[in-house]
Image: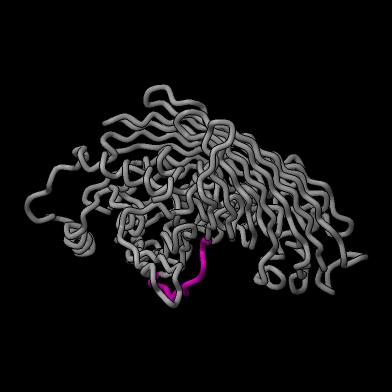
Amino acid sequence: MNTIQQFFKTRYECCRTITRRGISGVTGAPTGLSWVVCLLCLLSIALPKRAYAIPSFTRQTGFSCDECHTVYPNLTPFGREFKMHGYTMSVSKAVKSSSDATTTPLMNLNKVPMLSVRIVSLWSNQAGGNNGIVPRGITTGGQGFVSFPAGYNDKETFNLLGDSSIYIAGKISPNLGTFMEFSGIDDEGGSLSLGMLDTVLVAPDATVGGKSLVYGIRGVDAVFTGDPSNVLGTWGLTSQLMGMSTHNTLYDPNRAMVEGGELYALWGGFNNGGLFGTVGVYHPTGSQTAGSFVQGNLVGMSGTPGTLNTSNVDEAVRLAYYLPAIGNLYAEAGASAYFGKEGMMAPSTASISNPFYNDTYYNYALDAQVQYIGDKNLAELFAIYQSQNDSKFYGQDLYSNIDYGASGTSVQRNGLAVTADYYYERTYGAYVKFLSQNSGKVKDMDVTGTVLGLSWFPWQNVQLFLEQALFSTYNPGLAQYQNTSLSPSDFDVTSVKLEYLF
């Protein structure tokens, strides 16, 4: 048995002897709840795990979800090990060829189904105001602000089936695993599309300088998908927030439409001190070579959107150090950089003397996190600061009514995001998320928002959120209505969300 499997099996046997924490049973009928909630409750009773995570992983490993997750999607040190090993750790039975097989003698396949489903029901209500200029109830199109992974809907205030997902996740073979999310399913006719891809080929464990070395290669469709801290994707802010780059930046890693590969390595561990590094190259997808997405740098111009040169390749690098644990306290500090160049062609009707141009941009970031993972108390703090420069921004700043379409302009953008949460017995929780981004030149990009939230796991596999999003600055919304006298608080949103996995 190889090193990975031996480590995992030993930990599994140890964990089996420990009485896992659980929530008290609920007796009687759920009086006063909607039939939807009742149905979810009945379904959840049949499932063995209460924590919120990807169920196919728990079926593969035999672990409860809180072995790998603090609160989804945040990971424990062991959850990070699982991700670094390409989701291949398993104690489940496999389909293997016999030693004297005459065909496919190296077959070793996971016997556990890799399929999971997430169902979301969502009610949201925008504050609105100012004599009805900003609508009440239905959230303003393009706002896209709320908790991971689904945002507000901009067509209805209530969705029985919101932006739900299907996952194919787990071990494919001993050194190959995947995490794929197909999202977009809803009760408004949304179509299924690939929302996230992380396919990993991991090398056998090694030892260098007396410390373990885990390394491999990942195929991804978002920047730093393989980061073990999820530090770039847990802010509760989606790509609907206005960005400068046509194929997004590190602010929006889970929605950036790219195809790429990442080489990664972890030297040491997450408990005793470890160094993680990754180098990635990314390429714009076909959906960005034509269509309205490219219009991000050409907004305000007449005519059809421009096209993006698909021959461009962007590069990224990340380095993070995980400090030795002190009791139940874990900490990380890291840095990252992203370098991109977009070869653009403007629409024929745009007022640009030379329709062919390049937009070079650089993004640098510093991040840190601290987690206290106790038997009953869980507390976490995540923070990231980013600075980005675009060499050529073409288009109109609708907020300030300044047109940069003739020659373009250099634009600097800075941002700070902080998330803090507390949970008792992984069941009752509260969290706050803060993000502020600003540009000294293009005011359309200035946003400062805070999300206050309560979270509760009432039954197994079910999580209920109550959230309030508050804006002190929301220039994208004000610019959309071409009315800077509006109040950012007109875009505040109250929401209730129910998520169920099986």
Which residue lies most toward the front here?
100
User: x, y (%) of residue 33?
Assistant: 18, 57
Which residue lies most toward the right here?
353
Magenta segment? 186-197
Which image quadrant for residue 487? top right
Report if residue 377 is visible in the image. Answer: yes
Residue at the (24%, 51%) spot, across then down: 49
Which residue lies most toward the left here?
28
User: x, y (%) of residue 360?
Assistant: 80, 52
Q: Is residue 268 left or right of residue 412?
A: left
Residue at the (92%, 65%) spot, across then down: 354
Q: Is residue 187 magenta?
A: yes
Front-lying residue, 367 or 489: 367
Q: Quadrant of the C terminus?
A: bottom left
Q: Is residue 462 left or right of residue 444?
A: left
Residue at the (12%, 48%) spot, across then down: 26
Q: Is residue 482 left or right of residue 422?
A: right
Front-lying residue, 379 or 275: 275
User: x, y (%) of residue 131?
Assistant: 51, 54
Front-lying residue, 237 or 172: 172
Q: Is residue 218 magenta?
A: no
